Image: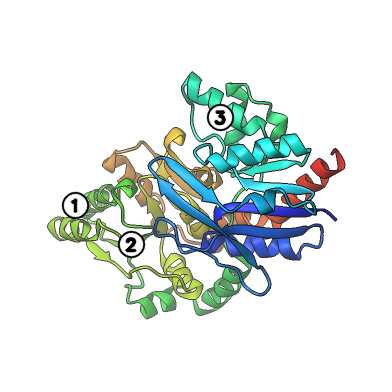
Amino acid sequence: MARVNVIYHHYPHYRRPVMEALACSGAHDYRFWGSLDDVAGIKTFRGDARIPVRPLRFRLRGPFWLLGGYWPAVLDRSADALIVHGHPNMPASWLIGLAGRLTGKPVLYWAHGWLKRESRWKAFLRRLHYRLGQRVLTYGLRAHQLASASGFPVERIVPVWNSLDWPAARDVLHRLETEGVAAVRRRLGLPPAAFVVQCSARLMPACRFDLLLEAAGLLKGRGVETHVVLIGEGPQRAALEAQAEELGVKILFPGAIYEEAVLGAWIFASDVTASPGKIGLSAIHSLMYGTPVVTHGDMDRQMPEAEAIIPGETGSFFPPGDAAALAEALLAWRDKKSAALRARCREAIETRYNPQAQATIIDAVVSEVCHAR
């Protein structure tokens, strides 16, 4: 059993399940270090009796991520390996990689890795950064392709995917399926036969919910009444309310919801999830409840979780910025909710995008690098 210090700028609340899976796997002894402050509006998991989080200092200064107080974790002689949030704009990530090289302690970078094709200079810096570690744990397979194209040794890339609290969601899902879609809709104040499109995200311009409302307006002109549900808060809410009123589109703002049973009910009750900008964990959350996902198909402007969508099977892609194409993509999922569709959506969750699957892969990589030490 190896002792592994995991060093992150902070642990978003949705990281708790995979941290618990690692802590309880029994394969290795994981200890967690990170800031206890919320970052950029994202709630932080501050640890508990089962998963203590040793506090670090973190702040954003321009493009740089400044982390402090991490050296005791790096120089801890009892630690056999380090897992580090691998962000090139975080100087600590470089310094920890260098320290690992000097001390012979394996460093695993856990990061998005490669999201898009980059300029030669930026690609060089990314390769230099990640070469300091023994492995890069990425959120998907596309990073593999981009790393290879940039000249990085792909044998050092290990996809570990991403996840939410699938065990908790599974319990919620069982209760919702017992209740039935029509009953859940009535409980939420939705018409049982309505065409419902939802998304859970911060209401920010980058999400392009204005494009979603434009598409809903186009569908209304074709006689398809669309009920748009936007779960979350943010600076664009007033503008979206005004746009919906102008277009005559039905829209609901349930607010920011963190209770899984409540949020799961909204997703379960919807025909489709739509994120016209980019999509991340919202895709995973939607598929967990058997709801297909529509988002744009420019992968250079997407998040890794978009890889979970299988076009025509569990969702659709449309050209960025094209409201008419978005309307068609949404309409394709009208009245398509079935047990078979829900099962197809959940397949990606059950095989890859869950905390236990992530922990199993990470355990194996830690064993590999520590054995080769």
Q: Is residue 202 visible?
A: yes
Residue 58 lies, with reference to residue 36, above or below; the image says above
Counting from the top left corner in percent of width and height, residue 310 is at 54, 44
Q: Amino acid at mark 2?
A: Leu
In terms of image quadrants, where is residue 233?
A: bottom left
> In the figure, is residue 128 to the left or right of 217?
right
The residue located at (49%, 75%) in the rendering is 261
Counting from the top left corner in percent of width and height, residue 195 is at 34, 62
Counting from the top left corner in percent of width and height, residue 334 is at 38, 56
Comparing labels 2 and 1, the label whose residue is closer to the camera: 2
Q: Residue furthest top?
A: 120
The answer to whether mark 2 and mark 3 are in CB contact below 8 A is no
Q: Secondary structure at mark 2?
A: strand
Q: Amino acid at mark 3?
A: Arg
Q: Which residue is mark 1?
A: 221
Q: Which residue is mark 2?
A: 230
Counting from the top left corner in percent of width and height, residue 185 is at 39, 74
Q: How many marks?
A: 3
> In the figure, is residue 224 to the left or right of 84?
left
In terms of depth relative to the viewer, which is nearer, 194 or 57? 57
In terms of depth relative to the viewer, which is nearer, 229 or 143? 143
The residue located at (19%, 56%) in the rendering is 239
Comparing labels 3 and 1, the label whose residue is closer to the camera: 3
Residue 153 lies, with reference to residue 21, above or below; the image says above
Residue 58 lies, with reference to residue 37, above or below; the image says above
> In the figure, is residue 83 to the left or right of 313?
right
Q: Quadrant of the C terminus?
A: top right
Q: Which residue is mark 3?
A: 126
Residues packed near mark 3 inside 10 Å, few (<14), some (14 to 19) or many (20 plus)? many
Q: Amino acid at mark 1?
A: Gly
In terms of depth relative to the viewer, which is nearer, 256 or 366? 366
